[in-house]
Image (cartoon, helix red, strand yellow):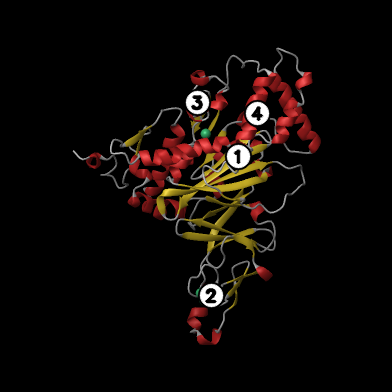
Amino acid sequence: MALTEERPGKTGSIPFAMRDGIHVPRERYYDRGFFELEKERLWPRVWQMACRLEEIPQPADFVEYEICDQSILVVRQRDMSVKAFYNACRHRATELCKGSGRVPGGQIACPFHGWRWNLDGSNSFVYGEWDFDPELLKPEDLRLVECKVETWGACAWINMDPQARPLQEALSPGAALLEGYGVEDLRVYWWKEAIVHCNWKLAQEAFQEAWHVMATHPQLTMGAGEQYPSDSAEVTAFANGHSRFQARLDESGGGVMTGEGFLDSMRLLWEGQDAMILERDLRIFEGVRARVGPGEDYASAAIAALIDYDSGAGIPLRTTPEAMRLWGGEVYLFPNFFFLPMYSNSLSYRARPYNDDPEMCRFEVWSLTMPAMGEEPGRAKLKGRFALNDVENWGRIPRQDFSNMERQQRGLHSRSFRENRLASQSECAISNMHAEVDRYLAG
Ligand code: FES
Ligand SMILES: [Fe+2]
């Protein structure tokens, strides 16, 4: 029998549907029909992080958010609110703005024949007006077509579905998990992107579990090698496709970490990633060396010093037990956005399809940190697009994660392979995401 004849889900209304929480049909990562269904039923209906608000700090600032064949402009208004419009001229469809920047004179102008719009989307100029049938120039019809937009977590989120439920409802309960941590206080330290030859879901799966650390990031197991517990993180799947992983609470109360062990792990995180731990944090941790005696817990002393430093510097670090439990873990917000908080920093990811190709994705990485209260760093700008093996621009940890993605995507095409087999607990966030995709595809 040909392998394709007994594909799960073939008979249902959704091709290659998830039939349970432990198998993922491989076609979900490359099949053109499946990808088209995502374009038709998922992307136009789901809330998507379109930009960080720091990208549009002033009135007339805009960002173009591209998703598959759609382009949306997010525009800062004079009153500092945010609007979003489909990026297509009302004359002959030309995309009005590309990339990001500030529209001169507060006018969104079409490069083709110079028609213009105010920041609120109302038309302000039609070239050669006398030559148009009045029916074509009704003001309401000339307005730029709005797209739903809301803000949360220092980001603007768009939704192309006019009937979409409110953002807060869609992000629930994922966003609430981060509330006590203070994502709204995070600002860009750096922001980079890569084009990866893999499906957008596959790229995300590399961050929805922590037990690949043993094989993929052996340096982070601190010599524990195969003793590194694969169940050291607790993964929880939530409604609406969201999920979280965090360190499993050690019932013994945890061991005492020596100074060098703790500092080595922090140094590896800083050098390997420059996001969850920044150099400043490491220096603070090193500074307590003289104060911690042998046999005393270095980590507790180091964190006390960090809390002390942050409160002196006016950095709004939250230290409730709930906020602290998020440190070193991850929160995934369906469909394609992540926070990995640690201390007053966070790593953040966004993945989306690239070039209308089911097997390519655009993967962005942010290193975020909380500046002192009242301090506003300048406009956030993408540093650039870098090759996956660029040692100057990607630390060892992302390069290790990237190295699996394209190999896994190619492996999916092997004639020997039919579907991913998922661990019930450790990989439940992956099946939860796929199940939510199917809910959208089912309409
Ligand atoms: S296409 Fe935009 S003004 Fe003509
Ligand atoms: Fe990883």
Q: Which residue is mark 2?
A: 112
Residue 258, percent from left and from top: 67, 17
Q: Tag 1, which secondary structure? A: strand
* Amino acid residing under circle 3: Met
Asked if residue 98 lies left or right of residue 199, the reply is right
Residue 263, percent from left and from top: 67, 25
Q: CA distance from mark 1 to mark 2?
A: 40 Å
Determine the image quadrant of residue 317: top right
Q: Which residue is mark 3?
A: 214
Q: Which residue is mark 4?
A: 266
Circle nearer the N terminus (1, 3): 3
How would you rate the neighbour count of disc 2 (Cα within 10 Å): few for under 14, some for 14-19, many for 20 or more?
A: few
Q: CA distance from mark 3 to mark 4?
A: 17 Å
Q: Tag 4, which secondary structure? A: helix
Residue 277, percent from left and from top: 66, 34
Q: Tag 2, which secondary structure? A: loop
Badge 2 residue CB within 8 Å of ligand 1: yes
Q: Tag 3, which secondary structure? A: helix
Asked if residue 251 lies left or right of residue 54, the reply is left
Q: Nearer the viewer, mark 1 or mark 3?
A: 3
Q: CA distance from mark 1 to mark 4?
A: 15 Å
How would you rate the neighbour count of disc 4 (Cα within 10 Å): few for under 14, some for 14-19, many for 20 or more?
A: many
